[in-house]
Amino acid sequence: MKQTGGHGQYGVCFIDIEPMARSTGFEFVDKIRGGAIPNQFVVSVEKGVRKALEEGVLAGYPVVDIRVLLVDGKYHEVDSSDIAFQIAASMAFKEAATTAGLLLLEPIMDLSVRVPEEQMGDIIGDLNAKRGRILGMEAQGDGTTVVQAQVPQAEVLRYASDLRSVTGGRGTFAMTFSHYEEVAPHVADRVIAEAKHQKAEAASR
C-alpha cells in the first residue's frame, strides 16, 4: 500500500504480486470490489505498475513474468488524480518486488559455429570461458565441424571479432535468441553492484 499526500495528489492502492511461468510476460488483475477505486483510477494503477516494470528493480532491468493483483484502495473525490494513483502504484510495486526476492535474468542465445576441425578445441575452450553450454558437434565431411551451443548474450556481443581472432578468419557462425535464464549469483551480484555504482555516479554529477 502506498499513498501520496497533498492537495490534488491523494491515492492509495493495495497490490499483491505473483510469479508467472517463464516467458509469459505480465498480467494485471483488477480485483477491486464495491467501487473502492473508480475505474479511471484502476487504469492509472496499471499504468503506474507498467512504468515500474519498465524501470526495473534489480540493476534497472525490466521486470517480466509477473502477475500484479489490485486488491483494494482508497480515493478522495477532490484530491485524487491520475498521476497520484500512478505514483502510488509504482511505489507499491517496487516495495513489494524488493521484498519478494526477484531473480535477475539474462538472454541466452543459440549459437552455431562452423570451424576447421583442427580449431574445434580452441572454439570449445572459448565458449566454455564465455559460460556457454556445448549442445553438440557434427563433422561436415569437408574438414569443418559445426559446434552447437547456448551462450549468454552478454558474452557474445563481439563474437564476430572473437571468432576471427580464434580462427584467423576461417570460422563462421549464426546466432538467434533462445530464452531467458537466471543469472549465476556471483554474476548477478557484480551486475547489480556495477549498476548501483553507475547510478550513484550519475546522481553526483
Image (spheres, rainbow, N blue to C red):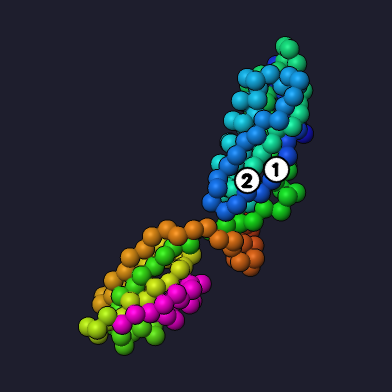
Report the span colored magenta.
123-139
The alpha-carbon separation of the residues under discs 2 and 1 comes to 7 Å
Element at label 1:
strand
Is label 2 in contact with label 1 (beta carbons under 8 Å)?
yes
Q: Which comes before the other along the chain, label 2 or label 1? A: 1
Question: In the shown orientation, is residue 29 left or right of residue 108?
Answer: right
Q: Which residue is mark 1?
A: 17
Magenta highlight on residue 138: yes
- Which residue is located at x 63 percent, y 68 percent? 186
At label 1, counting other C-alpha atoms closer than 10 Å, the crowd grade (few under 14, some 14-19, many 20 or more) is: some
Q: Residue lying furthest left in this view? A: 142
Question: In the shown orientation, is residue 170 left or right of residue 98?
Answer: left
- Which residue is located at x 41 percent, y 62 percent? 157
Q: In the rendered image, which quarter contains the C terminus? A: top right
Q: Which residue is mark 2?
A: 66
At label 2, counting other C-alpha atoms closer than 10 Å, the crowd grade (few under 14, some 14-19, many 20 or more) is: many
Type of amino acid under label 2: Ile
